[in-house]
């Protein structure tokens, strides 16, 4: 019982950290064709995500692995029910990954333009479809005792798409603040100017999302039952507000960290609303997959808890050290003198 | 075609493709780490240039290995939901642990290595690539412990309609997994050694830079000789595991139909699975098969006819894939030995025929690892978990043949393009040695 709850929290945390970290990689990939004015600026953006995107993506792999190990029933259902959207996410992530690596390998305008387009698509599709997938999970999937009855186009409903757009705008905003922090010169200033515009769009989408959630999902039921949890969506909103304030005061790091809090707050608002369900059914509550009816045995959960409690803190520490190591903003000079990077 | 058949083809495609890149990552990471360490210890700039030249090829290959690995983790849930829910309690653990203890390290520190050239001390930078190399080998261990469990399930009970883990210790000490790890990792090391030798052979034929490439070749030949010798030993250990735990796989790879005590090994043999017999059995080596399988001339080899036809793996492919893989394994030892010999006598550059052979021999270890994978996974059929769960019962119920056709075509197109681009970049960067030189000056 407690182990299942621990793993529910860990499950949510892995997804939340994944979106917090790869969110700005994906957002940078979407912004980059529009924000950068020349090849050097493009390489500055790639240089800002280059050292960390690989490690960020492993949070997704671990979220998948943890779902498999701790909630195999949910892993099997989630990945096979959402077959096509996950497939497109997969294709996109594969393309985005190799694009970052391959783009700078050949000096040629056409070669680079080709990969630039792929980076844009490969960043946009996962951001959108992860949102669509979670939006549909929040609403409940078409599951009953006989199996799954949903279709790919059925997932593209109003609330699913709304969540998709929320993810896209959230990641764009998050990435803009990341680029303010991690790039130098004019590019950084342009990213800051863009972030203020994106802020208004994000605030509007977030308001529509929070209201829509009350109509399309029952996520708020848990919050109404224990109002103390309202602190979590409050953190999301507070992060959004404070990121704007810090940006206007040119506190770049605090602005970005506030935006991190927003991402974590939004994801955890959904996670808390789901509890104890992992994949709710829209047809029949008894067919929902929960942490109790889809979990691994107590023995496996104990083993995995020990592994997670030892290694996750270690990962967090060395990833923070790596982020600190690469904290200096990427400048045009640094990019032009670097033969090893992207 | 059925969802099962299509899903099997898809898994074979995505796993086979992933496994084109992983072995080179495994081996080349160790070799690049070695070269950079030599640079730190000796201060010899040639080693630095070697680190950068081979490191660049390593990175081009690494990227594709990483991104195609994500597919593997998603595949189990997407296409094999029956499998995932039936054995997830035990099989999910090594996969999750792999990501946590190994993949995180590898992926986090590869960024530090790529972008840290100017920011880290020489020693620290070399240490980082050792972290990457060790993490990729550690990652292989956890993946192969998971695979070893599919071959020889241990430490579980069947409870409430699924397999549940009761002994984690048994899972991580499963000899089948460890032997497979040894076999696979050594195969990756041999593949990387042949890659080093083959590319160096090209430049030695063109006389680009003899000092640089003779030295690279020597590293490859030495590493290749040691690893291919150990690989034959590891192959023998694998054979023992198969003989002990997978009688149907053993019978299929040897095309042994009847149960025979003190079984001979036929040098020339042609299976005829349609009639449950061999068309040709010639040149017997007395006791050969019993010796090979159990190291005991009197041992009994169970024949395929002992098992219902529905429980037998496909014989023809298993048999030929296995024999070809073994033959290649011995060829690698011979070629690596020749290379080692020629470099010792410093006659390598004059042995142009040998250099030509080594250039084309780059593809042979790739062929061998694919054959090995085929032997291992096709020989396990019709079981997805040996003697426990049939592949046909493991597939996802919620997906349609149409879904899988879409995804399979998508994977083939996507991976086809990736492979073309990757080979283009690898061959371009291998050939353009001066790229490594000119950029050197910028540093």
Image: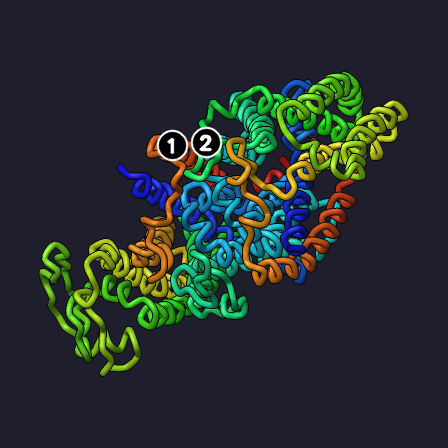
Quarter of the image where one finds residue A130: top right
SS for callout 1: helix
Which of the image's four quarters has the C terminus of chain A? top right
Query: Does residue A128 lie above or below A19 as drawn?
Result: above
Q: Chain of mark 1?
A: B
- CA separation in Å, label 2 and label 1: 7 Å
Which of the image's four quarters has the N terminus of chain A? bottom right
Query: Does residue B441 lie above or below B263 as drawn?
Result: above
Q: Nearer the viewer, residue B118 or B283?
A: B283
- The reply, left or right, for residue B77 in relation to residue A43 is left
Query: Badge 1: how crowded within 10 Å, few (<14), some, or many (20+)?
Result: some
Q: Which mark is residue B403?
A: 1
SS for callout 2: helix
Q: Residue at x 57, y 63 (%)?
A: A299
- The reply, left or right, for residue B410 in relation to residue A217 is left
Quarter of the image where one finds residue A270: top right
Query: Does residue B345 lie above or below B316 as drawn?
Result: below
**Position of residue A4 measured from the top left corner of the image (x, y, whole percent):** 63, 52
Q: Do callouts 2 and 1 mark residues in contact (Cβ within 8 Å)? A: yes
Can residue B189 be seen at all in this image of the molecule?
no
Q: Chain of mark 2?
A: A
**Position of residue B326 measured from the top left corner of the image (x, y, whole percent):** 30, 63
Q: Residue at x 37, y 68 (%)?
A: B238
Q: Nearer the viewer, residue A259 or B132?
A: A259
Query: Badge 2: how crowded within 10 Å, few (<14), some, or many (20+)?
Result: many
Q: Residue at x 41, y 55 (%)?
A: B349
Q: Residue at x 61, y 25 (%)?
A: A164
**Position of residue A245 measured from the top left corner of the image (x, y, whole percent):** 87, 25
Quarter of the image where one finds residue B398: top left
Provide the residue designation for mark 2. A84
**Position of residue A258 measured from the top left corner of the image (x, y, whole percent):** 81, 33
């Amino acid at each position: 019982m407690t182990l299942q709850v621990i793993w529910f929290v860990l499950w949510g945390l892995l997804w939340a950290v994944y979106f917090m970290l790869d969110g700005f990689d994906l957002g940078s990939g979407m912004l980059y064709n529009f924000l950068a004015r020349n090849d050097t600026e493009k390489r500055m953006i790639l240089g800002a995500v280059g050292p960390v995107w690989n490690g960020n993506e492993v949070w997704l792999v671990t979220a998948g692995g943890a779902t498999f190990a701790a909630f195999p029933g949910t892993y099997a259902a989630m990945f096979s029910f959402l077959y096509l959207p996950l497939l497109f996410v997969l294709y996109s992530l594969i393309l985005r990954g190799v694009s970052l690596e391959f783009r700078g390998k050949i000096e040629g305008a056409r070669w680079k333009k080709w990969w630039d387009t792929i980076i844009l698509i490969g960043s946009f599709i996962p951001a959108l479809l992860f949102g669509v997938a979670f939006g549909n999970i929040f609403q409940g999937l078409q599951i009953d005792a006989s199996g799954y009855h949903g279709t790919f186009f059925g997932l593209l409903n109003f609330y699913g798409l709304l969540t998709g757009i929320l993810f896209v705008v959230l990641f764009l905003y998050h990435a803009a603040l990341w680029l303010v922090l991690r790039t130098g010169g004019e590019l950084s200033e342009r990213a800051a100017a863009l972030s203020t515009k994106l802020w208004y769009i994000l605030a509007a989408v977030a308001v529509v999302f929070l209201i829509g959630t009350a109509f399309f999902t029952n996520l708020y039921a848990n919050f109404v039952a224990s109002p103390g949890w309202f602190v979590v969506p409050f953190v999301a909103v507070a992060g959004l507000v404070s990121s704007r304030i810090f940006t206007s005061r040119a506190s770049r790091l605090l602005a970005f960290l506030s935006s991190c809090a927003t991402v974590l707050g939004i994801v955890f608002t959904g996670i808390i609303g789901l509890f104890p369900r992992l994949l709710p059914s829209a047809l029949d509550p008894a067919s929902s997959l929960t942490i109790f009816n889809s979990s691994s045995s107590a023995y496996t959960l104990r083993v995995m808890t020990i592994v997670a409690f030892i290694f996750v803190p270690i990962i967090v520490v060395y990833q923070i050290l790596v982020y600190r190591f690469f904290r200096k903003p990427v400048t045009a000079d640094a990019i032009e003198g670097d033969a090893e990077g992207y | 075609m059925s969802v099962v058949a299509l899903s099997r083809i898809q898994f074979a495609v995505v796993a086979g493709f992933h496994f084109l890149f992983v072995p080179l990552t495994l081996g080349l990471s160790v070799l690049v780490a070695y070269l950079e360490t030599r640079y730190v210890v000796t201060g010899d700039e040639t080693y630095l240039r070697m680190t950068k030249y081979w490191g660049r090829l390593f990175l081009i290959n690494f990227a594709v290995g990483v991104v195609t690995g994500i597919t593997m983790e998603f595949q189990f849930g997407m296409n094999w939901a029956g499998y995932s829910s039936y054995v997830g309690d035990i099989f999910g653990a090594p996969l999750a642990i792999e990501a946590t203890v190994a993949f995180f390290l590898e992926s986090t520190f590869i960024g530090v290595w790529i972008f840290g050239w100017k920011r880290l001390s020489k020693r620290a930078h070399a240490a980082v690539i050792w972290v990457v190399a060790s993490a990729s080998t550690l990652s292989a261990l956890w993946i192969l412990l998971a695979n070893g469990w599919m071959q020889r399930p241990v430490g579980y009970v069947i409870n409430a309609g699924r397999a549940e883990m009761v002994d984690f210790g048994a899972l991580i000490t499963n000899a089948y997994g460890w032997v497979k790890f040894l076999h696979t990792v050594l195969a990756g090391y041999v593949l990387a050694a042949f890659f080093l030798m083959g590319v160096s052979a090209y430049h030695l034929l063109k006389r680009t830079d003899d000092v640089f490439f003779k030295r690279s070749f020597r590293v490859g030949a030495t590493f290749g000789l040691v690893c291919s010798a150990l690989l034959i030993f590891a192959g023998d250990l694998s054979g023992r595991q198969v003989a002990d735990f997978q009688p149907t796989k053993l019978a299929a790879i040897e095309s042994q139909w009847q149960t025979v005590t003190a079984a001979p090994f036929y040098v020339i043999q042609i299976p005829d699975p349609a009639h449950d017999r061999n068309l040709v059995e010639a040149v017997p080596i007395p006791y050969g098969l019993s010796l090979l399988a159990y190291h005991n001339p009197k041992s009994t080899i169970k024949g395929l006819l002992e098992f219902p036809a529905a429980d037998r793996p496909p014989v023809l492919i298993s048999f030929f894939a296995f024999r070809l893989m073994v033959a290649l394994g011995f060829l690698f030892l011979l070629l690596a030995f020749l290379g080692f010999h020629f470099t010792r006598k410093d006659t390598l550059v004059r042995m142009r025929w040998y250099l030509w052979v080594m250039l084309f021999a780059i593809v042979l270890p790739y062929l061998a690892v694919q054959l090995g994978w085929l032997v291992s996974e096709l020989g396990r059929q019709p079981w997805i978990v040996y003697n426990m769960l049939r592949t046909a019962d493991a597939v996802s119920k919620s997906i349609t043949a149409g879904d899988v056709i879409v995804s399979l075509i998508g994977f083939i197109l996507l991976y086809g393009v990736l492979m073309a681009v990757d080979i283009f970049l690898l061959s371009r960067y291998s050939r353009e040695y001066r790229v490594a030189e000119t950029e050197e000056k910028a540093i």
